[in-house]
Image: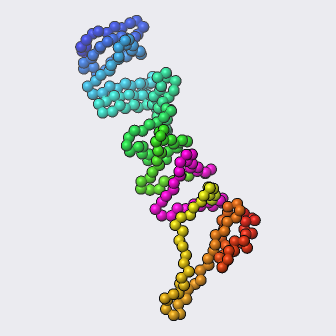
């Protein structure tokens, strides 16, 4: 072992102080200090290839390893933790079972966002202040599902649902309740009184279609009643008594 500079001091208490200590052709050290202390200057470990720090138990088995290389920093241990400046709070931890992030906010600045191969569990998804929140599935289906209900609300704005094909509102056991000052149904087709057999060859027949009129109860419920020359809503209003 060849020392380039001998500017180190060893004290009786086992602590080692130095400003700059450089070894050449060092393959193995027979002993190591339990504590290295450098005051008023940084402690620098430098190598042309990588710097590796190992921790071993009494049997000499490797229990932890930290390697700083030219292309990556690798840590091998049962659990990896990053703590706050005061050492009281765990900001990031990882083991074989899970990765935990303890910061108040997780911010991803990449243009493509975050990609998860499997499910993600969270109790709150929130956009930045004054920014829109967008949930998108570019090529497949986006599903919102919860056993006790899904609530979508816009406190000071509009709620819009649009699609290219059918829009289905379905309740298997309950009701679909529309409550507003004005309810509009646009683009309703207009029927015509033209005879369907007009211009047809003689002897042509057609099946008579059953037509209904839309009736409304006092509580807002809608129901259908067979259409006749006059309104039949009043004669079929017994539906409202049981609704």
* Foreground pick, 124 / 13: 124
Out of 133 and 38, give the one closest to the viewer.
Answer: 133
**Vertical placement of residue 171 versus 225, above or below:** above
Q: Is residue 152 left or right of residue 221?
A: left
Residue 224 position within the rendered picture, expressed as x and y whole percent measured from the top left: 65, 70
Q: Is residue 22 visible?
A: yes
Quarter-wise, where is residue 232 in the image? bottom right
Residue 146 appears in the figure: no
Q: Quadrant of the N terminus?
A: top left
Position of residue 55 in the picture relative to residue 216 (left or right): left
| Above or below: residue 186 compared with residue 108 | below
Give the x, y percent position of residue 177. Answer: 63, 58
Image height of 195 relative to 117, above or below: below
Residue 26, magenta (yes or no): no
In percent of the image, x 46 and y 62: which residue is there? 164
Placement of 203 over or under 155, stated as above or below: below
Which residue: 42% across, 43% down? 114
- Magenta residues span 147-175
Instruction: Please name whichever residue, 26 or 106, is drawn nearer the observer in this view of the structure.
Output: 106
């Amino acid at each position: 072992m060849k020392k380039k500079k001998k500017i180190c001091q060893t004290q009786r208490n086992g602590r080692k102080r130095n400003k700059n200590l450089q070894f050449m052709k060092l393959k193995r050290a027979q002993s190591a200090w339990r504590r290295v202390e450098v005051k008023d200057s940084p402690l620098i470990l430098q190598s042309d290839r990588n710097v590796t720090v190992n921790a071993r138990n009494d049997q000499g088995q490797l229990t932890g390893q930290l390697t700083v290389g030219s292309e990556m920093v690798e840590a091998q241990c049962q659990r990896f933790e990053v703590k706050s400046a005061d050492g009281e709070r765990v900001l990031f931890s990882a083991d074989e079972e899970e990765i935990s992030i303890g910061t108040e906010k997780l911010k991803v600045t990449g243009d493509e966002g975050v990609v998860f191969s499997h499910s993600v569990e969270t109790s709150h998804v929130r956009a930045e202040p004054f920014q829109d929140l967008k949930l998108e599935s570019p090529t497949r289906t986006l599903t919102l599902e919860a056993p006790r209900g899904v609530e979508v609300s816009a406190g000071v704005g509009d709620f819009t649902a649009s699609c290219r094909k059918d829009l289905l509102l379905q309740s298997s056991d309950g009701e679909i309740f529309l409550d507003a000052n004005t309810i509009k149904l646009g683009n309703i087709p207009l029927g015509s009184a033209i005879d369907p057999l007009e211009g047809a060859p003689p002897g042509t027949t057609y099946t008579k279609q059953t037509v209904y009129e839309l009736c409304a109860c006092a509580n807002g419920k809608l129901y259908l009643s067979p259409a006749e020359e006059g309104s039949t809503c009043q004669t079929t209003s017994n539906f409202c008594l049981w609704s």
